[in-house]
Image (spheres, helix red, strand yellow):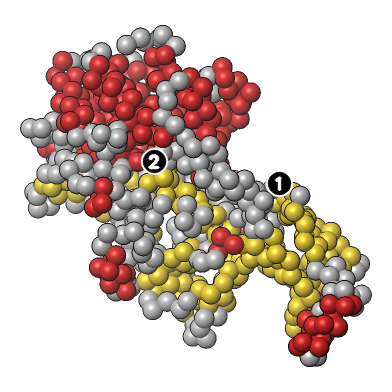
Amino acid sequence: MYQQSIKPPPPTLFILLLLLFGGTTTCLFAAPAEVLVVSKEGLRLDLALTTPKDVKEVELRFYSSRNRPISKKTDVAERHPQRQNKLADEAKRDHEIWYPVVDLAIEPGLDGIAEFETTTPFDCIVNAPYWMVPRRGGSMVEISSGQLEYWENSIRIDAPSPELKTFYLRKRLAMATPRQERSFNLLSGQWSGRVELYAVRASGKEFLGEAHVESSGKEAGHESPNGDLNRANLLGALRDSFEFTMRCQNQNPNSPSYGGLQLFYDLEAKTYRCSYWMWGWGPSVRFLLEVSGQEAFSREREKLQTVAREIGECSLRHLWFEPGTPFDQIALSRYLGGKTLPHGFQGAITFADSLFLAGWAWLPLYERFGEKRYLDLTRQLVLASDEVMDGFEVIPHSYYVDSRDWTPQTIDECGFGMEGYAEAYRTTRDPLFRTVGQRFLKQHIDLFEQPNGGWARRYNRLTGEFTYKTSHARGQGWAMEGLLAAYRLMSTAKNLERCRNMADNFVEHQREGGYWTFEYDQPVSEAGISEKGTALWSWLLYQTYNYTKDAKYLDSARKALNWCLENRYAGPDEEARGSIIGTTNQSAVFYRPWFQVSCSYTTAFFGLALLEELKLQEGRDKP
């Protein structure tokens, strides 16, 4: 247990300090003995306060070390290969977003205080996308406890933005007696920072004392991970993976995304990020459900299934309601940020994303727990997609619910919407799902399929222009998932041939270490290693092997799994352990390029690939 208190110095030290520094020392130690005692035990911070008898109210301030410094939208990573150009671009940005971190459990009256280096008022938006109400800010912006998020928070300010010099949590307490004890819950056992105590008087606030708390985490980290495919190592990696996934869950009961997942963990800012990217939760749900069936984790089974159900329930709270349109009761895919948007964000419906979520989360939850609402909503989604296909050569990527318009482009990643049709048909054998799925596949095949087996990256329906690049590891992986789902839905030789063609292209471009770069035809120094793509392709190639029994796909899948195993994070940051850190131009997809970031769906696909390897070793499908 860590403990620190503020006490006056021993008399001999006091005299020495007085001789050295004069009368100022008496002011420094004017507070009575043990004004503030702070101790930390696990996820609890205990405070003991002793104040002068005339103090009837005090103010506590909690400063987390995770806010030194506070990250912001315009940050540019030191390792960015085009750093000087990026710095110049960010200097032209028309807004700034600051990301203060909250790593203390919120309770009523525990408010956030952001102090800016300015005396000029400004307009800002706090914690979009869920709280998109403009407000007036100045030297101080107060964020009520009910509007705070766990971990990443945001303050968006039009340029030029003043500097956010500090952020702290403030709690005021009535002092019925001169001594009071109080406990606060921490979000991390590695919480460190400073606690300050002030007396609140009619004349103002009087500083009484402070205490510094150091991290008590296991700074040495775990043993270095290895890539062995033995059972013990696979089970250990599975445990690390599901524990990381559960740590990503949003535990803030005040948050609209309570129960859902934070999509990222930022190793450099030391915070979980992005709780509003709902489609990405799907693979984590299936991973948690599948790993709960492992006898080795029978003790964790109930918790694993509970978290999976809570994620699913949170996705249902993100349905869009617009009666009389095909968008009614369709799950929002995500909230999209953009500099031209009036509040910085707006909701997006992407039919491919919603179908992906249905296939990975809704239908597995229906199968496991019999919750029919998931099947009913999937049926409604499929019918709506059929209606939308009537109006387009191919469904555009996204419909923005605020501006009520479609994006001009469709991208290769939309192919993964086939997951929803395939799983709905497998679960029910209702021919509706197969018929609409065939139509969805044909639209995409006709436009996107390329001679090398890959898919064009992008199609613009307004200009008719294509981006033909087929080397984006993650994007092509999503298209490959769609092809595998199409084979499950319609087990034709042609669909299997398509799977082989795309898989062959990626096997050919796999690097010796087992990974793919972000663009497989670019060097690591320019593109970075695609940790998302490598984990995804490992699972995809296990599936391809299952359908073809061709050993080259199993060999490639195992090489990718070996890389993932070797590159699990095992450093001093306990929150990141079990994840795979990525450093690319899309480290956190739409922000934080070239920073060190891990992704929850990367961990899910890594976990699903681990489960595939275990199945092979257990003899259920021997190579």
Residue 489 visible in image: no
- Residue 238 vertical placement versus 61 (above, below): above
Spot the residue most to the bottom: 22
Where residue 95 sits in the image (x, y, percent)? 37, 71
C-alpha gap between disc 2 and disc 1: 33 Å
Q: Which residue is drawn at 42% across and 14% down?
A: 617
Q: Looking at the image, which is closer to me, 432 or 424? A: 424
Mark 2 crowd level (few <14, some 14–19, many ≥20, 10 Å Cα):
many
| Left or right of 72 in this view: 480 | left
**Where does the C terminus fall, quadrant-wise?**
top left
Q: What element carries label 1?
A: loop
Q: Which of the 4 quarters of the picture holds residue 545?
A: top left
Where residue 125 sits in the image (x, y, percent)? 47, 68
Where residue 481 sits in the image (x, y, percent)? 28, 30
Q: Residue at x 90, y 69 (%)?
A: 178
Instruction: Identify residue type, mark 1.
Output: Gly
Where residue 367 sits in the image (x, y, percent)? 47, 20
Mark 1 crowd level (few <14, some 14–19, many ≥20, 10 Å Cα):
some
Instruction: Identify residue type, mark 2.
Output: Trp
Q: Which of marks 2 and 1 is in front?
A: 1
Q: Which residue is drawn at 11% across and 44% down?
A: 468
Q: Which residue is drawn at 42% across and 32% down?
A: 565
Task: Check disc 2 and report the residue beneath it.
Answer: 279
Q: Looking at the image, which is closer to me, 559 or 22? A: 22
| Left or right of 424 in this view: 456 | left
- Residue 203 vertical placement versus 340 (above, below): below
| Left or right of 443 in this view: 473 | right
Residue 555 visible in image: yes
User: Residue 448 bears which disc, if any?
Assistant: none
Q: Do the residues labelled 2 and 1 touch (CB within 8 Å)?
A: no
User: Residue 42 bears which disc, if any?
Assistant: 1
Number of numbered markers: 2
